[in-house]
Amino acid sequence: MEQKSRSISWYRVPVDKQTLKRLHQRSNWKGALQISGHLGLIGLLGTVAWQFQANLMVLLPMLFLYGTCFAFIMNATHELHHQSVFQTKFLNGFFLRLLSFFGWRSYVLFSSSHGAHHKYTLHQPDDLEVVLPAKLTLMTFLRTAFVDVLGIRDSIWRTLALSMGKVDTQWNEYLLDMMATDKRRDLIHWARFILLGHVSIVAVSFYFGLWMIPVLTTFAIFYGQWLRFLCNQTQHAGLADAVKDFRLCTRTIILSPPVGFLYWHMNYHIEHHMYPAVPCYNLRKLHAAIRHELPKSPRGLLTAWRQIIATVKRQAVEPDYHFVPTLPTTTNG
């Protein structure tokens, strides 16, 4: 895959220096509240599920809730990758690796991919982490919403391949080719650590007859993805690619505080792309500072998905169509 060396002159809503400096401030305290609240909720639901493991009528709904909350650890790894959750670098790195392990994520490969996604958002071939138009169907939702059996298979094979220094897509092959030798070594070692770690969890658990432990750890990322799917897929779906304005290629939505918390505040997605170093817990304040130049934000997932579904249906007959948000007339972009 041939890649071009270029820079994109992105439009960013101006923010005065003092305000931006405050918004960029990372806090160990705020980071601890975010991550302990999320992991604490997971721990609470997992404890309840453990207590009722002999009662399927209670266990299955509890596992569904557990998986729903657990799924968002992938958004946590995204934020930790940006090194903006904690002021202390070690804490960002520690939790990035911990949660990447339970999410079967190669944080090394993701770091390369996501760096390109922010630098070249939706400009092919420089960013292939997200490709538009998105192929969204009811079947793609149902495949991952409840129990993602194919996801288990794919994650195991992908991690096996990475453990041997091999990748599964042309985009990942390009990223691998661009990596320095030490990064390649880290990628391989991390994949082997994931495999060895999860094999050990499963083997020890089944030896002692503790079948619930792998359900709550090794396989937890593969069920209950419905809410994360509905949140994550709003970020770019139906919007334009190859533009230089994040307001036209990313979508901010207004969510209830509990869902926004689980989602690690990534519903403020225009803001995140404009100023990616702003910690997630400061994005609401950033939104308030620049919303005079933002398009109207859909309120709630239902409103956002009505917009997306209407766009996807139209794209089926008009492949070049995309939704164009109305920008405020006061904008200087």
Image (spheres, rainbow, N blue to C red):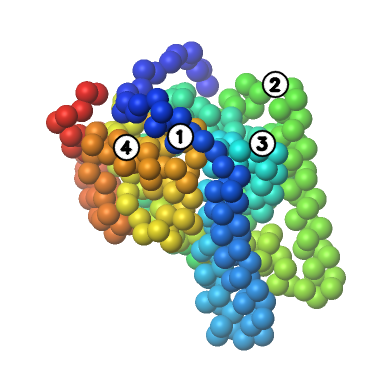
Return the residue at label 3.
89
- The image quarter containing residue 215 is bottom right
- Circle 1: element type: helix
Quadrant where the image shows the C terminus = top left
Q: Residues within 10 Å of mark 2 (few under 14, many from 20)?
A: few
Q: CA distance from mark 1 to mark 3?
A: 19 Å
Q: First in sequence: mark 1 or mark 2?
A: 1
Q: First in sequence: mark 4 or mark 3?
A: 3
Residue at position x 27%, y 39% from top?
291
Percent x, y of residue 276: 46, 33
Percent x, y of residue 202: 77, 63
Residue at position x 61%, y 63% from top?
40
Residue at position x 46%, y 25% from top?
119
- The label nearer to you, 4 versus 2, is 4
- The label nearer to you, 1 versus 3, is 1
- The label nearer to you, 1 versus 4, is 1
Q: First in sequence: mark 4 or mark 2?
A: 2
Question: Of the residues shown, which amino acid type is indicated by label 3?
Answer: Lys
- Circle 2: element type: loop
Q: Is residue 201 left or right of residue 92?
A: right
Question: Of the residues shown, which amino acid type is indicated by label 1?
Answer: Arg
Q: Is residue 174 left or right of residue 281?
A: right
Question: Of the residues shown, which amino acid type is indicated by label 4?
Answer: Ala
Q: Are marks 4 and 3 in contact (CB under 8 Å)?
A: no
Return the residue at label 1.
22
Q: CA distance from mark 1 to mark 4?
A: 12 Å
- Circle 3: element type: helix
Return the residue at label 4.
289
Numbered circle sitting on residue 180: 2
Q: CA distance from mark 1 to mark 2?
A: 35 Å
Percent x, y of residue 13: 31, 28
Q: First in sequence: mark 1 or mark 4?
A: 1
